Image: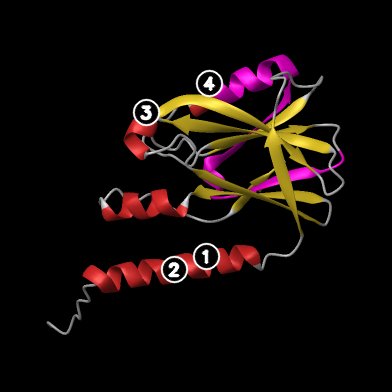
Amino acid sequence: MKNVMNIYITGKRQHMLFAALLAVLFGTIACISGVPLRTEPMVSGVLPDGPYAMLLSGCSYSEKLDNAVILAPENGAYRFEVYGPAFEIKVRQGVSAADALQGADRFLRCSIYYQKSQARRVLDPAGAVIGYEVRPLYSPVKFGREDLLSISYRMDNGKALVYIWLDQDIERTMNSEGDGMKQDSGAGGY
């Protein structure tokens, strides 16, 4: 009855395994089809007239760090799809421009580490604005810097695919401190 095999991974082996898993993850993301999109800071802080669909990602528990909001114009040329667990993606439609940024900031306050938010414009391959992202900024005293997220966009078959994850250095620090993050996979979109 005691034929159960226990495997313990410690020390260097654990770090090597983690590094290998990160390499596979980033290799997978790099091989995803589509054209990469870029973002730039939103200078004015004012959105053009809406309505917007708000894609709310994360905020499933108070210590979660990889939270973000994507604002997609409902009359825009592209449909946005956030890659992540379905239970962590919520969509609110018909949000006015005036309420979109305030609603995004309110949503991001779910994390106990939240300090403020930062808005960025999402650009298509030609440089036209197709949407906006609002990301949380955290305490640099706690984490060493404010911006802890990596957000990647790819254009594929008329959709803007969004991938949100913690920066690998922050993830590694969280794992080494025993504060592993709950992770899942899936997709949700507008």
Report if the CB atoms under discs 3 and 4 are less than 8 Å apart. Answer: no
C-alpha distance separating marks 2 and 1 = 6 Å
Taking depth in this image into account, of 175 and 41 the one nearest to the observer is 41
- Residue extent of the magenta highlight: 77-106
The disc labelled 4 sits on which kind of residue?
Answer: Arg
Element under label 4?
helix
Q: Sort mark 2 into few (<14), some (14-19) or many (20+) by Cα contacts within 10 Å.
A: few
From this view, report whether residue 175 is shown above or below residue 46.
Answer: below
Which residue is disc 2 drawn over? 21
Which residue is disc 1 drawn over? 25
The disc labelled 2 sits on which kind of residue?
Answer: Leu
Report if the CB atoms under discs 2 and 1 are less than 8 Å apart. Answer: yes
- For image coordinates 61% across by 62% down, the residue present is 29
Element under label 1?
helix
C-alpha distance separating marks 3 and 1 = 28 Å
- For image coordinates 71% across by 14% down, the residue present is 98
Which residue is disc 3 drawn over? 112
Which residue is disc 4 drawn over? 106
Numbered mark located on residue 78 in the image: none
